[in-house]
Image (cartoon, grey):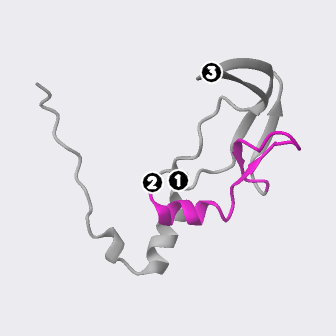
Amino acid sequence: MDLQPKPPSFTLFTELPLELRLKIWSFIAPGPRTVSIKYKGLSFYSIGKGFSAAAGWRSPDPVPIILHISQESRTEALKSYQLAFGSYHHLGRIYFDFSKDIQRFGNN
């Protein structure tokens, strides 16, 4: 049995003025990140009766948490972050803020 106390929660957040909530979201957004970007070659895997191919730029780094908290936080975060490093054949899969994030390509 887990006897750890539950962390306190603040259930009135949505009742705060919008300006204050937006300020809070700006503090939660991460600072400049160094994002590792690697190219994953073509690989085939089975989906039901067919096969699908996957290739493109990937990152082992986590997606900024602000994109997962709430719809409001995601909307604010998407003003800075965009899906990037795609190609004509593959949509971008890495959330990146071109105004502050740093790209690191390869394994080093």
| Disc number placed over residue 66 in the picture, else none | 1
Disc 2 target residue: 69
81 inside magenta stretch: yes
Category of crowding for the residue at label 1, using alpha-carbon neighbours closer than 10 angstroms: few (below 14), some (14–19), many (at least 20):
many
Query: Could one spot residue 49 in this view of the protein?
Result: yes
Q: Secondary structure at mark 1?
A: helix
Is mark 2 in CB contact (under 8 Å) with mark 1?
yes
User: Mark 3 or mark 2, which is nearer the start of the sequence?
Assistant: 3
What amino acid does circle 1 point to?
Ile
User: Mark 1 or mark 3, which is nearer the start of the sequence?
Assistant: 3
Could you tell me residue 36's position as x and y percent? Answer: 74, 32
| Disc number placed over residue 46 in the picture, else none | none
Task: Report the magenta residues as a range.
Answer: 69-98
Residue at the image point whose x is 49% and y is 66% from the top: 72
Instruction: Using the image, determine if residue 37 lies above or below residue 7.
Output: above
Instruction: Using the image, determine if residue 45 lies above or below residue 95.
Output: above
Answer left or right for 47 relative to 28.
Answer: right
Quarter of the image with the C terminus is: top right
What amino acid does circle 3 point to?
Lys
What amino acid does circle 2 point to?
Ile
